[in-house]
């Protein structure tokens, strides 16, 4: 039986009638039409589907859309635009942090959370932060480089703003 | 994969959840962080007809100080328990074991109550709660009852909780000042379930081990604590020789089996290495 679910995603409301078993990942992609969030394994192992629930990263394949009613969802679409990349997206672009791009939105969400908690992480801290997500292409080193680059970009922007 | 259809109920209080459990019987399951239940539903290993969401019950995630114990609400998320000053100060073994539980993102959602009730045999928290002598407070249709961790954890994915009961709180006694403790684990990747983990609590008085509690996951034994190993240490000189002898007892008592992650011989090696590391570290941490 379907029920009405209304979710706030990136500050915007999306309403649809869905079954309670509808995963948050499917609501985001098929009901809200936000295809930036990817789906790999659907059992919590790969991290491709990582979004934020109430400002904290979560696997969207391990939550039901109904569960998230009254909670704030943030997806990769909240970061930057094609014209104006966010520092993290810019870092990934400059340092080849992606090849096929399947894992990228999940990695970006993890990195966003990391930099909120820890604006100047060490390489080991970056490594630890992304350790739960799988990438089949890059070998991870360029992802670490990309996040480190985003830290530099942010610092540069802060310096410019101060000048 | 996608889960089977179910009816969704959002509980607003513990009483509400217990009432819903009574009404739906074995057709229903509680949904906490969903980090173990939803994967199992996605695989269709389980197909509850009703899910009672306890994730929005006010106060179920509180961590407070009780009479000589830290009282942790069943709904407290892993990351919150792990970072709690109260837990780190009074139950450092629990905080330390948490650094091996899953990945940060999973710990954002998963709850201590769900972890305990799920009771994966490789799970860190049930092991340390057993060593810490924790008590589990269960709410049921006839009121609350308290079960010691020793008798709560039964076999693999089995606990003493009845179908119409809900875990509401975990009381963890303070670790006494001067006590030594340690937790060590080996997993394929950091954050994965452990192949073997070892946990230790002890004190050192007049150069001898006392109040020894030692337990393992992955040893293939019936109980988490190993009485034989504890006896091999209790009252004995706090020396490397005693530790070596005790670790040998652990390997002799163990009965691990081959699985996809590791074969039994490797697990025996891990029992020996992790057991020794944990005992040495606990000895170093204990004040004489
Ligand atoms: C990739 C990955 C890696 C993981 N690695 C580890 C690891 O290394 N170590 C580890 O210990 N765990 C690990 N986990 C599991 C994780 O810790 C879960 O959060 C935990 O086991 C379940 O907690 P939950 O709140 O998510 O419970 P849920 O998944 O919501 O529920 C689990 C079970 O407990 C029952 N339940 C929940 N709350 C209560 C309650 N209050 N009273 C009675 N019954 C209740 C539910 O009905 C269900 O049967 C991992 C999970 C994933 C996806
Ligand atoms: S799709 Fe969610 S973790 Fe793989
Ligand atoms: S870029 Fe292809 S999976 Fe990471």
Image: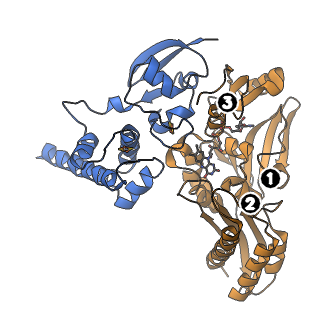
Chain colours: A blue, B orange
Q: Secondary structure at mark 3?
A: loop
Residue at 51% in and 26% down: A24
Residue B207 relative to residue B63: left or right: right
**Can the viewer see residue B176 in this picture?**
no
Does the residue tagged 3 have its C-beta within 8 Å of any atom of ligand 1?
A: yes
Of B252 and B59, the residue lying toward us: B252
Q: Is residue A56 above or below residue B102?
A: above
Q: Residues within 10 Å of mark 3 (few under 14, many from 20)?
A: many
Q: Earlier in the sequence, mark 2 or mark 3?
A: 3
Label 3 – label 1 distance at C-alpha: 22 Å
* Residue at (49, 28) in percent of width and height: A25
Parent chain of label 3? B
Judged from the image, the secondary structure of the residue bearing numbered disc 2 is: loop
Return the residue at label 1.
B149
Please indicate whether residue B16 sits to the left or right of residue A154 in the image.
Answer: right
Q: Is residue A111 above or below residue B192?
A: above
Numbered tag placed on residue A140 in the rendering: none
Q: Residue at 74% across / 43% down in the picture?
A: B117
Residue wearing tag 2: B132
The residue under label 3 is B54
């Amino acid at each position: 039986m379907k029920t009405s679910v209304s979710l706030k995603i990136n500050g915007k409301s999306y309403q649809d009638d869905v079954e309670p078993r509808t995963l948050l990942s499917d609501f985001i992609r098929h009901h809200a039409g936000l295809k930036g969030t990817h789906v790999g394994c659907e059992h919590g192992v790969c991290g491709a589907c990582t979004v934020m629930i109430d400002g904290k990263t979560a696997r969207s394949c391990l939550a039901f859309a109904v569960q998230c009613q009254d909670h704030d969802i943030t997806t990769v679409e909240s970061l930057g635009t094609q014209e104006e990349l966010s520092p993290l997206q810019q870092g990934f672009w400059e340092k080849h942090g992606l090849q096929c791009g399947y894992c990228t939105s999940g990695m970006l969400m993890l990195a966003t959370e990391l930099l909120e908690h820890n604006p100047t992480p060490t390489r080991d801290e970056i490594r630890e932060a992304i350790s739960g997500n799988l990438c089949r292409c890059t070998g991870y080193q360029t992802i670490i480089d990309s996040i480190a680059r985003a830290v530099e970009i942010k610092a540069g922007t802060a310096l410019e703003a101060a000048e | 994969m996608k889960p089977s259809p179910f009816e969704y109920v959002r509980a607003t209080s513990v009483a509400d959840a217990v009432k819903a459990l009574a009404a739906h019987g074995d057709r229903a399951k509680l949904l906490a962080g969903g980090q173990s239940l939803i994967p199992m539903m996605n695989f269709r290993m389980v197909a509850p007809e009703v899910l009672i969401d306890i994730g929005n019950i006010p106060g179920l995630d509180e961590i407070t100080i009780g009479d000589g114990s830290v009282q942790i609400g069943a709904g407290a998320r892993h990351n919150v328990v792990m970072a709690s000053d109260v837990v780190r100060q009074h139950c450092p073994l629990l905080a330390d074991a948490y650094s091996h539980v899953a990945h940060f993102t999973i710990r954002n959602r998963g709850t201590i109550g769900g972890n305990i009730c799920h009771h994966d045999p490789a799970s860190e928290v049930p092991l340390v709660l057993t060593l810490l002598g924790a008590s589990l407070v269960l709410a049921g249709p006839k009121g609350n009852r308290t079960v010691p961790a020793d008798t709560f954890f039964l076999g693999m994915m089995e606990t003493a909780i009845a179908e119409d009961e809900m875990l509401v709180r975990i009381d963890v006694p303070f670790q006494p000042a001067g006590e030594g403790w340690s937790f060590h684990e080996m997993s394929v990747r950091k954050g994965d379930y452990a192949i073997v983990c070892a946990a230790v609590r002890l004190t050192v008085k007049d150069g001898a081990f006392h109040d020894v509690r030692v337990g393992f996951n992955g040893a293939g034994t019936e109980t988490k604590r190993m009485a034989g190993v504890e006896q091999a240490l209790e009252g004995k000189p706090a020396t490397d020789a005693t530790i070596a002898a005790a670790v040998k007892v652990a390997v002799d008592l163990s009965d691990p089996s081959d699985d996809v992650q590791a074969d039994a011989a490797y697990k025996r090696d891990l029992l020996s290495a992790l057991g020794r590391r944990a005992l040495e570290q606990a000895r170093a941490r204990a004040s004489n």
